[in-house]
Image (cartoon, rainbow, N blue to C red):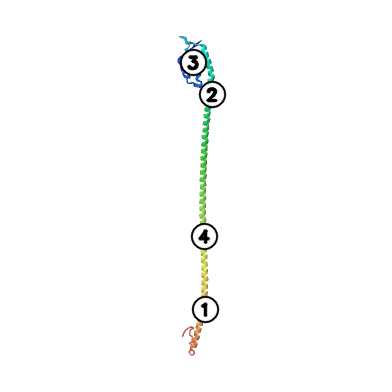
Amino acid sequence: MARKNSSSRKGADSTNHNHSGYSNGIEPDVYQELAKLQEIIYESFHIPMTRWTVIDEGKVLDQLEMISDRVPEAINRALAILEKEQEIIADAEAYAQQMIQSAQQKANQILDQTGIVQQAEFQANQLRQQVQQECEAYQQQTLSEVEQMRRQMTQELDQIRQQALAECDAIQNDADQYADAVLIHLEEQLDDMLRVVRNGRNQIRQNSLPDEPIPKNLPEGSDH
């Protein structure tokens, strides 16, 4: 069988070198069988001065059959590898999505906690202001009540003092009247006693001087 060379050996070597990387998930056995097919072709008789090569058709067909037997298995393995890679990628994407959702939930939770803290601080400030206002109002009310009580007590003390002074004046007047009445009574008694004394003296004097005339116009109570 004669076949025309469409490429040089150098290009084939380059292709063989690229296949050595086992790209696209194909098994190494397939590349080895392809390499053997290339060797069969390269080792065949080349017609000089032409671009034709005489190859052994049986060897080529056998090698192609061997390759065709290996390809489905290699493709299945490659597909399995691709499927596994896709599963790994899907798992990685699911894990990444889960991590993103977890981070988002944690961020939302932190925001919620921050909002709760801010709300608590706001309520605490309001409560503190309310308590302060109530304390100030109670203090003002207490001061007003104390001032009112002080004024009321001052008025009551003034009334008590005025009432006490009035009672003292009344008692003093009563005492003065009583003392004046006692002194008047005592004066009357003294006048009576003095009259008795005078009369007694006059009587004694008359008894001791019977012949002596009593002077006329003599003041009463005079010794001579």
- In depth, the one of 70 and 153 nearer the eye is 70
To which residue does mark 1 refer? 189
Label 1 vs label 2, nearer the camera: 2
Cα–Cα span, label 3 and label 2? 26 Å
Q: Amino acid at mark 2?
A: Ala
Q: Identify which residue is drawn at 52% across, 34% down.
A: 102
Q: Amino acid at mark 1?
A: Gln
Nearest to N terminus: mark 2 or mark 4: 2
Cα–Cα span, label 1 and label 4? 52 Å
Nearest to N terminus: mark 1 or mark 4: 4
Q: Secondary structure at mark 3?
A: helix
Q: Identify which residue is drawn at 52% across, 73% down.
A: 178
Q: Identify which residue is drawn at 52% across, 58% down.
A: 149
To which residue does mark 2 refer? 80
Q: Are marks 2 and 4 in contact (CB under 8 Å)?
A: no
To which residue does mark 3 refer? 36
Label 2 vs label 4, nearer the camera: 2
Nearest to N terminus: mark 1 or mark 3: 3
- In depth, the one of 98 and 123 nearer the eye is 98
Q: Amino acid at mark 3?
A: Lys
Q: Amino acid at mark 4?
A: Met
Q: Residues within 10 Å of mark 3 (few under 14, many from 20)?
A: some
Cα–Cα span, label 3 and label 4? 128 Å
Q: Residues within 10 Å of mark 2 (few under 14, many from 20)?
A: few
| In the image, residue 66 above or below residue 135 | above
Nearest to N terminus: mark 3 or mark 4: 3
To which residue does mark 4 refer? 153
Nearest to N terminus: mark 1 or mark 2: 2
Q: Secondary structure at mark 2?
A: helix
Q: What percent of the width, then of the height, locates residue 165?
A: 51, 66
Question: Total number of numbered labels?
Answer: 4
Q: Are marks 1 and 2 in contact (CB under 8 Å)?
A: no
